[in-house]
Structures are given as structure tokens and as C-alpha cells.
Image: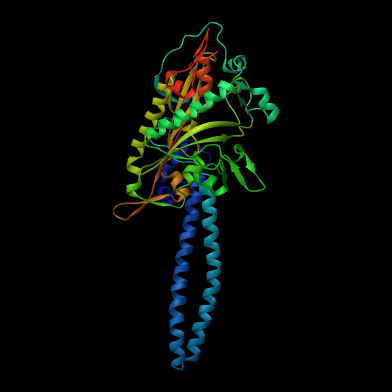
């Protein structure tokens, strides 16, 4: 969440940023935060003065009694009792103002960086780069859901029987391709200096608040009500929360973690051709990159992550493009975000496969994730994450773009992981 210092010292800049993110009622919300903060501070000041007076009077009472000044001592005791009663009310007022302010801060999105484009939605995103090999497909090219059935790779109907729509069953070479991609992505991350983590796939509400899924995306997560636990929508949540309430030493930064997990998203209200097959699922596999860094190095970390994801797509020989997201299409928590999309020749459309985001101090402030500089000063870290990569649409693009009359060709980089060169 935004810090009070950001809001009070750079109010106009914060308001401009929230306008770029199309946050409704920004001015009223920020004004209320400032008002609650003023109330909290003034109450704290009065409480501090009263406590100082209580302490001072308490120290004098014994001396007054020894000097035989009983009336003055009793007056001091009465005043102490009055102040203590007043302080109870002040403490309650201060606590309530702080709680109300905190709840309000949770509802305010992150402020985008200056280089985030203006725009209301996906149509306003800026294409930064395109690349990858072009694939010429047969005239009768099939979409991946038909290829999956033809080669017995993925059974969508069986998934509906076992669980419901959006929970496919991978079979045979389809399952092996899935596992190959996971291992390929993890090996590539490890070679780039990331430490692999195997986190839980359920988290408590504190973790959801820490990375910003709560309260913003509460309806999109599966909730285990009996235990008040949430199935994770991404490994970002458990891995980043490892550093909740942690003070790192400057020499430990940047922290570089990667994790493979199953991910779960309710995606309520998703229907139509854009969600057929693997295009949008309720459960899917993903390898995530998470970084914790110093503010002055986070931009460089972000670029390194973008280069890493682009390198994966190049090795998979897929046509891709990189988008700089506009303010209206960015996530609630991101300050800067780039999306990677791969092109599906069979569907004639772009499929998002990764978002690589810099959150500045927004998550770190929620998490209380800090670092101690060489000068022993404690500051908030910057957090970053990105998919490297989400599997469903990668599998869809691989199947569709590599179909030939003889079968589906496996990219060279994946052959050692699959153990086969062709699906036929």
C-alpha cells in the first residue's frame, strides 16, 4: 500500500497517478486518509502530553506526602486519575483512526510510474517489441483443443467429469510435455541465479493482504472457509510472503527466488471463444520469478527479468510481443508492468503468457519487508515478480504453431526434457 509519507508529501503526484489508473473517488479517498492521519497524530500528541504530565505528577506525590502537603498530594492524585480516564478515550480514538486509515489505504491502488502510458484498457497498451520465428501452417490447421483430442494429449471432458470446467486432465505425451516445460523453466531460472522454492499452495489471509490479493481480488480466489485459507492464484503470494516482517541486510539483495506451483483462479464470469481449451483455466501450472531489491536497483532487476522471459520464448521458437501496459490495464498493485504474448497461428490471436511487474514499495509496505543499509538505516525494499512462464497458453501455442502433416514438432530446446521430437 501507499505510505503516509508518499500521500502527505506528494499529494498532487499521487492524485495524478491514481487518475492514470482510473481509480474512482481518488481525491475524496486521499483527503479522508490525510484527515484520519491528522486525527491520529493530534490525538497521539495530546496523549503523549497527558502521559508526560501523569508521569511528572506521579513522581511528585511521594515527595508532597513526605513534606506533609496532603492536600496538594490528593489534588495531584485526582488530576492523575482524571488524566488516565481521559487517556483511555484518547487511546481508543487514536486506535480507531489508525484502523480506519489502514482499511482505507488497503483500497487505494499503487501509483504508476511516469513512463506508464495513459489509457483505459488493453487497446491502449503499447507494443514495445516483437520477435520470434514465423510459422506457416497447413491450410487445415487446427486449434489446440482439437489437436489435444486428435493426439490424445489433454482430456477436457474428463476434467469436467472429475471436477468441472476449467480443470483439464493431461495424458501421455501431453503430461510429459507439461512436465518438460516445468523442468525447462526451472533449470533456466536456476542458471540465471534464482534459488528454487517449493512453497505451500494455500495461504492465510495475512499473506493475501501482504501481496495485495486481498481485499482487491478476494472474489477471484478459492476460499477454504472452515480454515480461512486461500488457494494461491500465483506463487508470488507465498514466496513474497516469506519476507513478511523481515529486515534483510543490504548485502543479501537482490533476493532472487523461483517457484513452480499449481495456481487456482475462479475467473468468475468468463465465457466464450476466448476461454476455450487452455486459453483460461481454473487450475494451471506456472513457474514464477520473485525478486526483492533495493529501490535504486529495482529498475535494473526489472529489465533482467524481462530479458529472462524473452529468452525463454526465443528458445521455444515462438512468435511473441512485449507490451508496456497502460495505467487502466495494470494490476491494482503494480507500478510498472510489461506483458508477454505469444501468437497463435491457428486461432489468429495473441495469448498472454507472462506479466512482469515492479511494485516499488507498495507490497513491501504491506509486508513490512525492509532492508538495513550499510549506514544502518532501515528502508522499505522494492518487490518484483513475473511468470516464467505460465504453461497453458504456452502449450496451446506450441501445439498450434508446430503442427505439421506428420505431427507436432517439439522445439529443439525441449527435446532433452520431453524425450521425443515429435507428437504423432
x, y percent for residue 78: 53, 81
Please state, as top left, top right, bottom left or bottom right, where the C terminus lies in the image. Answer: top right
For the point 46% across and 62% down, the residue is 42
Label tally: 0
Q: Residue furthest bottom?
A: 68
For the point 45% across and 89% down, the residue is 64
Q: Residue furthest right?
A: 161
Whether 358 is drawn above or below 342: the answer is below
Viewed as shown, does residue 356 lie left or right of 166? left
Whether 106 is drawn above or below 235: the answer is below
Q: Residue 121, can we see it?
A: no
Viewed as shown, does residue 136 lie left or right of 202? left
x, y percent for residue 229: 61, 46
Q: Residue 293, can we see it?
A: yes
For the point 55% across and 69% down, the residue is 88
Q: How is the image coloured?
A: rainbow
In the image shown, does 157 or 233 lie closer to the viewer? 157
In the image shown, does 400 or 109 lie closer to the viewer? 400
In the image shown, does 60 or 322 lie closer to the viewer? 322
Viewed as shown, does residue 282 lie left or right of 55? right
Amino acid at each position: 500500500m501507499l505510505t503516509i509519507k508518499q500521500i502527505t508529501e506528494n499529494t498532487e503526484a499521487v492524485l495524478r497517478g491514481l487518475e492514470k489508473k482510473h481509480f474512482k473517488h481518488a481525491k475524496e479517498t486521499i483527503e479522508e486518509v490525510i484527515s484520519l492521519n491528522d486525527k491520529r497524530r493530534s490525538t497521539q500528541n495530546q496523549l503523549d502530553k497527558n502521559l508526560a504530565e501523569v508521569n511528572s505528577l506521579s513522581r511528585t506525590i511521594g515527595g508532597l506526602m513526605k513534606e506533609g502537603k496532603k492536600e496538594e498530594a490528593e489534588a495531584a492524585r485526582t488530576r492523575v486519575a482524571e488524566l488516565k480516564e481521559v487517556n483511555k478515550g484518547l487511546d481508543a480514538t487514536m486506535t480507531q483512526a489508525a484502523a480506519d486509515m489502514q482499511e482505507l489505504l488497503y483500497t487505494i491502488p499503487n501509483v504508476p510510474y511516469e513512463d506508464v502510458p495513459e489509457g483505459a484498457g488493453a487497446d491502449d497498451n503499447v507494443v514495445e517489441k516483437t520477435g520470434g520465428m514465423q510459422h506457416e501452417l497447413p491450410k487445415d490447421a487446427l486449434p489446440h483443443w482439437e489437436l489435444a483430442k486428435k493426439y490424445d494429449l489433454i482430456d477436457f471432458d474428463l476434467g469436467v467429469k472429475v471436477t468441472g470446467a476449467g480443470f483439464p486432465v493431461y495424458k501421455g505425451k501431453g503430461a510429459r510435455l507439461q512436465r518438460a516445460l516445468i523442468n525447462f523453466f526451472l533449470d533456466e531460472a536456476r542458471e540465471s541465479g534464482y534459488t528454487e522454492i517449493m512453497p505451500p499452495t494455500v495461504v492465510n489471509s495475512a499473506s493475501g493482504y501482504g501481496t495485495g490479493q486481498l481485499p482487491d481480488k478476494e472474489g477471484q480466489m478459492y476460499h477454504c472457509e472452515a480454515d480461512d485459507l486461500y488457494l494461491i492464484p500465483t506463487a508470488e503470494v507465498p514466496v513474497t510472503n516469506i519476507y513478511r516482517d523481515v529486515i534483510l541486510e543490504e548485502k543479501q539483495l537482490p533476493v532472487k527466488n523461483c517457484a513452480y506451483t499449481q495456481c487456482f483462479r475462479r475467473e468468475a464470469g468468463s465465457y466464450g471463444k476466448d476461454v476455450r481449451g487452455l486459453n483460461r483455466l481454473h487450475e494451471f501450472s506456472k513457474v514464477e520469478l520473485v525478486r526483492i531489491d533495493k529501490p535504486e536497483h529495482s529498475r535494473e532487476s526489472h529489465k533482467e527479468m524481462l530479458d529472462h522471459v524473452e529468452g525463454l520464448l526465443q528458445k521455444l521458437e515462438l512468435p511473441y510481443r512485449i507490451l508496456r501496459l497502460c495505467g487502466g490495464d495494470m494490476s491494482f498493485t503494480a507500478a510498472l508492468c510489461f506483458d508477454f504474448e505469444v501468437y497463435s497461428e491457428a486461432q489468429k490471436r495473441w495469448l498472454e503468457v507472462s506479466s512482469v511487474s515492479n511494485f516499488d514499495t507498495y507490497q513491501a509496505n504491506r509486508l513490512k519487508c525492509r532492508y538495513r543499509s550499510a549506514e544502518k538505516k532501515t528502508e522499505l525494499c522494492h518487490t518484483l515478480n513475473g511468470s516464467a512462464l505460465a504453461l497453458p497458453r504456452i502449450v496451446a501455442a506450441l501445439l498450434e504453431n508446430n503442427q505439421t502433416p506428420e505431427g507436432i514438432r517439439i522445439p529443439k530446446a525441449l527435446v532433452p526434457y520431453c524425450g521425443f521430437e515429435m507428437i504423432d
